[in-house]
Image (cartoon, rainbow, N blue to C red):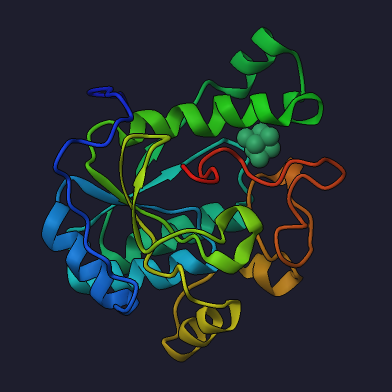
Amino acid sequence: MTATTDRPPTRPPGLELPDLEAADAREVVAWAMERFHPRIALACSFQKEESVLLDLIFSVRPDARVFALDTGLLFEETYDLWRQVEERYDTTIERWHGPTLAEQAARHGDRLWARDPSQCCAIRKVEPLRRGLADLDAWVTGIRRDQSPARAGAAKVEWDAQFGLVKVNPLADWSDQDVWRRVIADGLPYNPLHDRDFASIGCVPCTRPGQGREGRWAGSDKVECGLHLEDA
Ligand code: SF4
């Protein structure tokens, strides 16, 4: 897909955001859809959190927008789940992507992820995300405060100064167990890699089984792909 606009990251003067910390996830989603649809979309990385959010968002608005960043390096299980989700909710997930792997290798050499994962994420995730957000006023994410120290301060509704739009985190106060309870109770489709001890699922070269986010970029000090920065 191609970008339509770009914009400065400054918060628009007069933009008032409600304090929805006492609201439950459905109430947060309902408020966000009412306020921003169709200029709002769920960023879907096919983690268990998105299994919950997809179900919530489509129950509120069957025509809700969802997008995913296709790095070209996702697990087959993730692509399978992508197809399942589209079928279950009768939707098409907007796909954003960077250069092909061959183009990246020609410009930066083979296996950039092994030598400079931050640059690889910037090319394959952050830049496509920036284009994906360009025609939105708000995005919905599955981040939870207990996932990492960098996410501990996330509010349910906040200004995203990194990308210049409103960020909605309906599951900010959910625990890992809360998410699993909802997935199981409602029989929601989820990534089967979670059953093989993958707590956080990203690209094949950078994801290992492990709890918390320790299974991502094993052996390096990288903990975030650049999509959700502290204080952003
Ligand atoms: Fe590249 Fe790894 Fe980031 Fe995927 S997670 S974009 S392979 S560095």
Task: Name the one closer to the observer, 42 or 223.
Answer: 223
**Going 62% across and 64% down the picture, which residue do you hit?**
147
Q: Position of residue 82 (x, y in %)?
A: 45, 56
Position of 194 relative to 221 (above/below): below
Q: Position of residue 60 (x, y in %)?
A: 19, 71
Task: Name the one closer to the observer, 16 or 173.
Answer: 16
Q: Is residue 141 left or right of residue 11?
A: right
| Quarter of the image where one finds residue 100 | top right
- Residue that extends furthest to the top in the rendered view of this protein: 107
Image quarter in which the N terminus is found: top left
**Going 20% across and 35% down the picture, which residue do you hit?**
12
| Quarter of the image where one finds residue 162 | top left
- Residue that extends furthest to the front in the rendered view of this protein: 14
Q: Is residue 45 left or right of residue 114?
A: left
| Quarter of the image where one finds residue 199 | bottom right
- Residue that extends furthest to the right in the rendered view of this protein: 219
**Going 47% across and 26% down the picture, which residue do you hit?**
127
Q: Position of residue 226 (x, y in %)?
A: 57, 38
Q: Which quarter holds ligand 1? A: top right
Q: Position of residue 64 (x, y in %)?
A: 21, 58
Position of 226 relative to 4 (above/below): below
